[in-house]
Image (spheres, rainbow, N blue to C red):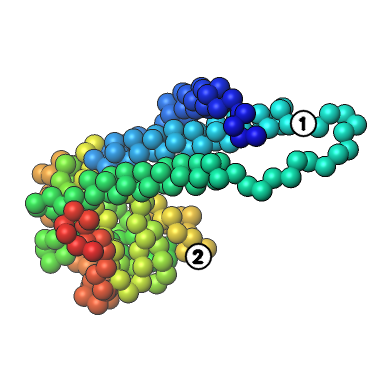
């Protein structure tokens, strides 16, 4: 029965439907404005995944509607269906095609992650402290200068955010940078970002962390390096001792960036 299917026509219909769905979905600006070097590769990755998903969806729909149309019982036909004991070609196809798609997605995502976490020679290290329900930040200089609720970073320089959660799990997300990383008590997680567009953004907690979760935000300012240095020099506070304890005691876990030959 599989041999009698109009495979070429069904494939053509699948490709046509994939093109139509992709033409509608890909131009939509799903992620909004991009403001880091990671934005381009991640947005392209999303577009490729949309096209692949459209293909799978189209394939299933074409086969479903073909089956509904072709194999519909005639009115009054009360007889049993044809007994079937599997179809090797069909089963090989529906195992092989998803396997290829998933392996391609995994390999491509790996390559993108490798690219966006590629360590630059002279990164700025910024400590990030998260606690219910506020963010604060430590900068090198003046013995770890400290700011609360406001994060400044220089334009065009890679920043390694070293993240310390002081109570429960929080998550660091600046949508325009595309990077999202969990802050976990007891361990230091690292996010690598190179901001490439000056402006004011929002840091948003994306891990449900308690009653005040939805208000757990901070202002993010990306500015030229000279202005950034001036701003840090003007900070009056140092990172308080209890927060520094987290810096010293946390276990460094990740990422040893993929490109650096680590885990
Ligand atoms: Cu939260």
Q: Name the residue at 35% across, 39% down.
A: 45
Expressed as whole percent of the image width and height from the top left, the position of residue 123 reads: 13, 53
Element type at mark 1: loop
Of 236 and 67, the residue lying toward us: 67
Circle 2 packing at 10 Å, graded few (<14), some (14-19), many (20+), is few
Ligand 1 lies under 8 Å from the Cβ of mark 2: yes
Q: Name the residue at 26% across, 73% down.
A: 251
Expressed as whole percent of the image width and height from the top left, the position of residue 215 reads: 46, 55
The alpha-carbon separation of the residues under discs 2 and 1 comes to 54 Å
Of 79 and 246, the residue lying toward us: 79
Of 114 and 59, the residue lying toward us: 59
Circle 1 packing at 10 Å, graded few (<14), some (14-19), many (20+), is few
Instruction: Give the mark nearer the N terminus: 2 vs 1.
Output: 1
| 211 lies left or right of 32 | right
Q: Quadrant of the C terminus?
A: bottom left
Contact, CB < 8 Å: mark 2 with mark 1?
no
Element type at mark 2: loop
Write down the residue under mark 2. Answer: 210
| 148 lies left or right of 70 | left
Expressed as whole percent of the image width and height from the top left, the position of residue 89 reads: 53, 41
Inspect this view and state whether residue 24 appears. no
Inspect this view and state whether residue 96 appears. yes
Q: Give residue 162's quadrant in the image.
A: bottom left
Q: Name the residue at 74% across, 45% down.
A: 83
User: Disc number at residue 72?
Assistant: 1
Q: Quadrant of the N terminus?
A: top right
């Amino acid at each position: 029965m599989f041999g009698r299917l109009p495979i070429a026509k069904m494939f053509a219909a699948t490709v046509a439907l994939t093109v139509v769905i992709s033409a509608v979905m890909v131009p939509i600006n799903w992620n909004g404005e991009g403001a880091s070097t990671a934005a381009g590769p991640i947005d392209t990755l999303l577009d490729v995944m949309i096209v692949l998903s459209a293909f799978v969806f189209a394939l299933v729909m074409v086969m479903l509607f073909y089956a509904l149309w072709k194999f519909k019982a005639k009115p009054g036909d009360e007889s049993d269906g044809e007994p079937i004991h599997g179809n090797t070609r069909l089963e090989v196809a529906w195992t092989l095609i998803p396997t290829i798609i998933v392996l391609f997605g995994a390999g491509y995502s790996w390559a993108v992650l490798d690219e966006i976490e590629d360590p630059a020679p002279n990164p700025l290290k910024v400590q990030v402290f998260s606690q219910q329900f506020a963010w604060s930040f430590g900068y090198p200089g003046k013995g770890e200068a400290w700011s609360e609720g406001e994060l400044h970073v220089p334009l065009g320089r890679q920043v390694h955010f070293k993240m310390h959660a002081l109570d429960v799990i929080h998550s660091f997300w600046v949508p325009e940078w595309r990077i999202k990383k969990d802050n976990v008590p007891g361990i230091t997680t690292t996010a690598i970002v190179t901001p490439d567009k000056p402006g004011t953004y929002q840091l948003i907690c994306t891990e449900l962390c308690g009653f005040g979760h939805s208000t757990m935000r901070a202002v993010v300012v990306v500015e030229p390096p000279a202005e950034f240095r001036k701003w840090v020099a003007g900070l009056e506070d140092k990172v308080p001792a209890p927060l520094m304890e987290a810096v010293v005691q946390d276990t460094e876990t990740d990422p040893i960036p993929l490109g650096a030959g680590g885990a």
